[in-house]
Image (spheres, rainbow, N blue to C red):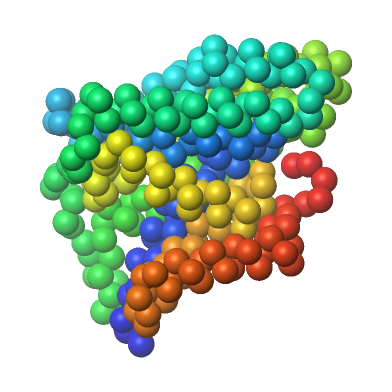
Amino acid sequence: MTAVIQAALNGAMMGAMYGLTALGLTLIFGVMKVVNFAHGSLLMVGMFSAYWLIRLTGIHPYLALVIVPPVLFVFGYYLQDVVIKPVFKAEGQVREPLTVIIVTTGVWYVLDNLALMLFGAEYRTVRTAISNKSFALGEFIISIPKFSGFVVAVATAVGLALFMRKTKTGKALRATSLDREAANLMGINQYRIYNIAFGLGTAIAGIAGCVLIPFYYVYPSVGVVFDIRAFIIVVLGGLGSIPGALLGGLVIGLIESVFSQFMASTWTEAIIYAIFLIILFVKPSGFFGHKQDW
């Protein structure tokens, strides 16, 4: 029983980081109504940014949280403005332009292959003073890097929810997500809001990259692993739902960690996909999703 509880604790902490990764994806979908297939690659960019910042400057890994997310926000803002916005304008009358999905898929391949050319295929990791640190919670051992990631994930979700509900920009994001034509009539520049939404989603991927780097390997295709998890989590939690992304991540993390105590990892993967399919059939809107727009 002790081993199962220990596995559940580890799964909850890792699941929170899966949820953090999915949080940026669900934000972009909630506002722009398109699936960003490049989200995993943006996470990879965040991880490499944190890796090289730590290696070259020697700063504490969590100080990278002050630098990397703002840089990723600017990167995402102008990526949307320069690469994706022209497609939106060309298909201005289409509610969910499929061409944008093709464009984000292209961005995914460009970023992954650019990283492969620049850094090679080898796995890299940053070993710091906290990488192998842990503390005891009764008879259970809690990894400090994973616990820190859990705290950051919850804080980010709460902060994003407050931002969306309490700030003028957040309300503009929500208004655009509900009806972009009506938002335009109210004086909201939908394309600037799309830039901000994409920038915020990319910044959240940067936050995830910073909390993963103390204990997780970084390599050019690392985003694929988290991308698949993020898509499953977004469907489980509900497209556009902030609490749903976090809860979906916790569910996936618990299944991944606890079930692996009793069966092979391949069966664990099969259970995750089976639950994914069941949710699609039984409640396509997810745990917190609604039939109407977010």
Q: In the image, is 66 to the left or to the right of 242?
A: left
Residue at point 38% right, 27% down?
111
Pick the front one: 281 or 252: 281
- The percent coordinates of residue 8 (x first, y second) are 40, 72
Q: In the image, is 182 to the left or to the right of 148?
A: right
- The percent coordinates of residue 27 (x first, y second) are 61, 37
- The percent coordinates of residue 190 (x first, y second) are 72, 18
Residue at point 46% right, 45% down?
227
Pick the front one: 136 or 20: 20
Image quarter of the N terminus: bottom left
Pick the front one: 203 or 220: 220
Residue 31 seen in render: no
Residue at point 64% right, 13% down?
86
Residue 35 seen in render: yes
Q: Quadrant of residue 81?
A: top right
Q: How many marks?
A: 0
Image quarter of the C terminus: top right
